[in-house]
Image: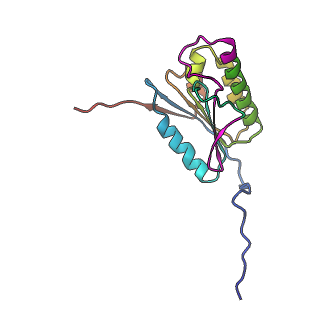
């Protein structure tokens, strides 16, 4: 006779006897193209069963938008701005600005709903520095997020106010060896 053990479901929430505080992490560099290390972290965490959202504010070209996420596995949603191009300037037309604002509003909404445990906001510093997303809104968003949600902010020239609220700052530098 084989005894059948009752096991918990993989998708059931883990309850701990203590509260878990989410972190605000910043990955910054003087150059772009360091997304690989952040993506690796997001994929690893999603592979362990944690719901992850990656938001690329300035990447476009595939007409994706928040209503058509790319799903990598069961636990990782990846969304880009619904734009015909990548943003590399603060000068947007009305449709582009509206698409970016829709994505920012959607991001704030799903974070407040605790839909994801890790949210990566890619190139957010550039969106702030271009004046496309107000720095004060980002600070308010970070302050009111659910306490267990981890947030990763990426981009060059991260504003000092965001560095001041970060729990962890990773500066990625190029090294040249002769």
Which residue is drawn at the image coordinates 43% and 24% (left, top)? 31
**Is 113 part of what is drawn in magenta?**
no
Q: Looking at this view, is 154 or 78 the one in front? A: 78
Q: Quadrant of the N terminus?
A: bottom right
Per the rendered image, the range of residues in magenta is 68-97
Picture residue at 46% right of the left edge, 33% below the top: 34
Where's residue 32, x and y in %? 46, 26
For residue 177, which quarter of the picture?
Answer: top left
- Residue 93 on the magenta span: yes
Q: Quadrant of residue 175?
A: top left
Q: Position of residue 6 (x, y in %)?
A: 74, 72
Q: Position of residue 132 (x, y in %)?
A: 63, 16
Instruction: Work out whether 35 lies above or below 156.
Output: below
Q: Which residue is nearer to you in this view: 99 or 163? A: 99
Check the picture and name the quadrant holding the C terminus.
top left
Q: Looking at the picture, how far across and down is residue 95, in whole percent? A: 69, 16
Residue nearest the viewer, comparing 69 with 109: 69
Establish if 28 lies above or below 78: above
């Amino acid at each position: 006779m084989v005894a059948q053990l009752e096991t918990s479901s993989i998708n059931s929430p883990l309850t701990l006897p203590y509260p878990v505080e989410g972190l605000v992490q910043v990955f910054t560099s003087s150059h772009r193209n360091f997304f690989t290390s952040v993506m690796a972290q997001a994929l690893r965490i999603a592979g362990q069963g944690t719901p992850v959202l990656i938001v690329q504010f300035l990447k476009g070209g595939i007409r994706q938008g928040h209503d058509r996420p790319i799903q990598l596995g069961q636990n990782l949603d990846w969304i880009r701005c619904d734009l015909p191009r990548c943003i590399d300037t603060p000068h947007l037309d009305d449709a582009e600005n509206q698409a970016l604002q829709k994505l920012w509003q959607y991001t704030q909404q799903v974070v407040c709903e605790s839909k994801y445990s890790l949210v990566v906001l890619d190139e957010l510093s550039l969106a702030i520095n271009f004046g496309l997303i107000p720095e004060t809104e980002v600070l308010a968003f970070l302050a009111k997020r659910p306490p267990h949600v981890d947030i990763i902010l990426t981009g060059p020239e991260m504003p000092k106010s965001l560095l001041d609220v970060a729990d962890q700052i990773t500066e990625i530098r190029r090294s040249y060896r002769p």
